[in-house]
Image (spheres, helix red, strand yellow):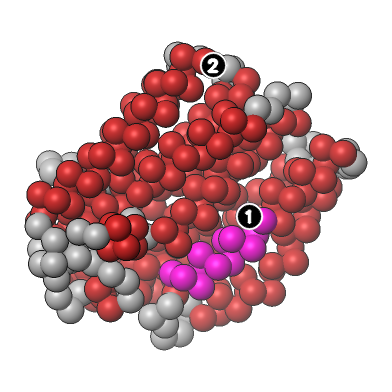
Amino acid sequence: MNLKTAFLSTRPWSFTMTFSSVTMGTLVAALAGRFDPFIYLLTLGGMVAFHAATNVLNDFFDVRHGVDRVGAPTTKYRLHPAAFGQTPLTTILGFSLGLYALTILAGVYLAYVSSLSILIILGAGIAGSVLYTADPVVLKARALGEFTVFAMWGLLIPLGAYMTQTGAYSFSPVAAAVPIGIFVALVLLANNVRDIAYDGSVGNRTVAVVLGAPRAEKVYATLLAAAYAMVVLGVIAQLLPLWSLAVFLTAPEALKLAGMFKGSIPDNADPRTAALALKFSILYMASLAVSYYFPFKV
């Protein structure tokens, strides 16, 4: 597997979600008076390696389980060397394990310089990452995929990023990152609603398969509204600055997406959701950065 294939097989376009989660936790720490640029970059690098390892391991097990194969929806829009037999599964597995090793190295160092409790978060994250597709659990095939990614990107990663800066637990980074975690879950849900027929045919019991398309579409719209509602609640509770209401600049696009899910689900449902998530996250993070210099709460 050459470098280009290895890089693309990690699905690098998805790393924006990890960037948002790590940066959100770091921004909350900065507002509390603690920010080390080196620690931030190391945390971000370790979490990108973690995200990449999760994606590659997902491909490994999906091919082994017969979910990903030539003609599967996922092979139509991205490089998938394992599904096409271009790369041996042992190589795919080794690549994933190497990425996990980088994550662990970064995590151990960060735990040493900040708090050993980070190892607990790291262990929980890796367990969730592996069990997401690994036998005998396969969380994503038990309608727990969306919950798992929400827990990772909405809770564990931002809390871990905060702790690498401060060395302490806090509710603040978790509360602030909930909307980002919801959007990560929405990207997966959009993918699963689009692939509902195929997933059902191969025994992949996603949330969309269990609920059925009409109800899954309603869950999508409800979660989309919840992401914005959580920002409003955060502002009212004075956990977030008034600047955070800037995320509502993306509301027209969100309404358009919600309307799209009431009809025929397009092939680009998940990248369109991811694009909205990125715009939302940029405005959201910018609001916290601005509040560092210009505090403005209700």
Q: Is residue 207 magenta?
A: no
Which class describes the residues within 10 Å of circle 1: few (<14), some (14-19), or many (20+)?
A: many
Q: Secondary structure at mark 2?
A: loop
**Which residue bears the numbered disc 2?**
114
Could you tell me which quadrant the C terminus lies in? top right
Q: Is residue 276 magenta?
A: yes
Q: Position of residue 270 (x, y in %)?
A: 44, 69
Could you tell me which quadrant the N terminus lies in? bottom left
Above or below, 246 against 239 in this view is: below
Question: If you read the primary sequence from the N terminus, does the residue marked by circle 2 or circle 1 appear first?
Answer: 2
Is residue 172 visible in the rendered image? The answer is no
Image mark for residue 192: none
How many marks overall?
Answer: 2
Estimate the spatial distance between the alpha carbons at disc 2 and disc 1, rounded to whole Å.
27 Å
Nearer to me, 272 or 235: 272
**Which residue bears the numbered disc 1?**
281
56 on left or right of 240: left
Above or below, 199 against 115 in this view is: below
At 37% from the left edge and 34% from the top edge, which residue is drawn?
Answer: 103
- The residues colored magenta run 270-282
At 17% from the left edge and 44% from the top edge, which residue is drawn?
Answer: 94
Residue type for callout 2:
Ser
Q: Secondary structure at mark 1?
A: helix
Q: Residue lying farthest bottom?
A: 264
Q: Nearer the viewer, mark 2 or mark 1?
A: 2
Residue type for callout 1:
Ser
Q: Quadrant of residue 251?
A: bottom right
Main SS of the magenta part reads: helix
